Amino acid sequence: LHWLTLCTGFGVVAGLLASAPVLAADSVKIGYVDVRTVVLESKSGQQHKAEMEKFVKDKQSALKKEEEKLKTLQQTLEKEMLTLTEAQKQDKQRGFQEKVQAFQKSAQDAEREVRQKDTEFTNKALEDVRKVITEVAKEEKVGLVLGKTEMSVLYAEDGMDLTPKVIKKYDSRPAAKK
């Protein structure tokens, strides 16, 4: 998922390195959250996945029907070509090409629609998850929460992982029970 790389950056790591002496002096409790896991394994993430699978399946089914119609039309045209004049052949081929282009546009539109729905869900989920992370961090008295990705957390003890608590709290929210 492309949005995960947007969640963390080099600025966070640089900020941590620059503030390391301050963190040590104040003994700030540090935790981390695997945001990707929260989004994918939460109730709303599982529901979104199921909805997207159904949506994609429906789109594929509709496109498959259109593809079958085009194949049938192509076979019919190939049979008719023997009896048509040159002008009629060109006219039929032009009409067939227009239908093929319309099919290709439908396929592209369906793919774009799937990406858009997924992006909209991801953006909304990230906004909600960030709020829940803030709530959990305050409840757990954690002064700094990092995103668990290859770029930002190289090692962490299991006790520092707030991901399960964030999922639990995220799932318990009324909006997550849709």
Image (cartoon, rainbow, N blue to C red):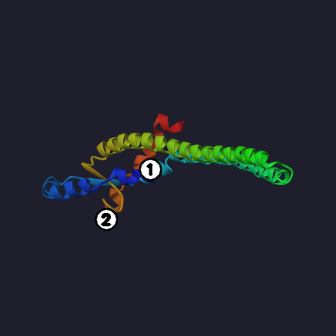
Name which residue type carries label 2.
Leu
Considering the image in quadrants, where does the C terminus appear? top right
Residue nearest the observer in this picture, 47 or 156? 47
Number of the label disc, if any, that sits on residue 154: 2
Q: Which quarter of the rendering shows the N terminus?
A: bottom left
**What is the secondary structure assignment of the residue under circle 1?**
helix
Q: For the residues marked 2 and 1, what is the alpha-carbon distance in whole angstroms? A: 19 Å
Q: In this view, does 96 lie to the left or right of 129?
A: right
165 and 8: which is toward the camera: 8
Q: Mark 1 — residue?
A: 38
Judge the density around disc 1: few (<14), some (14-19), many (≥20) Cα neighbours within 10 Å.
many
Taking the image as drawn, is residue 64 in sight? yes
Residue 144 screen position, x and y as percent: 25, 50
Query: At 50% from the left edge and 51% from the top edge, which residue is drawn?
Result: 41
User: Image quadrant of residue 122?
Assistant: top left
Q: Where is residue 96 in the image (x, y as percent from the top left)?
A: 72, 46
- Whether 14 is drawn above or below 133: the answer is below
Horizontal side, residue 56 vs residue 29: left or right: right
Left or right: where 20 falls relative to 1? left
Name the residue nearer the viewer: 15 or 96.
Answer: 96
* Residue at the extreme front of the image, as rendered: 86
On screen, 146 above or below 125? below
Residue 124 picture quarter: top left
Position of residue 77 relative to residue 131, above or below, is below
Q: State if disc 1 and disc 2 touch (CB < 8 Å).
A: no
SS class of the residue under badge 2? loop
Q: Residue 24 carries which label?
A: none
Q: In the image, residue 83 lies at what x, y percent? A: 87, 51
Which amino acid type is shown beneath numbered disc 1?
Val
Using the image as rendered, state which of residue 54 and residue 68 is in the foreground: 68
State the image coordinates of residue 158 (x, y, percent, origin top left). 36, 61
Which of the two discs, 2 and 1, labels the residue nearer the N terminus? 1
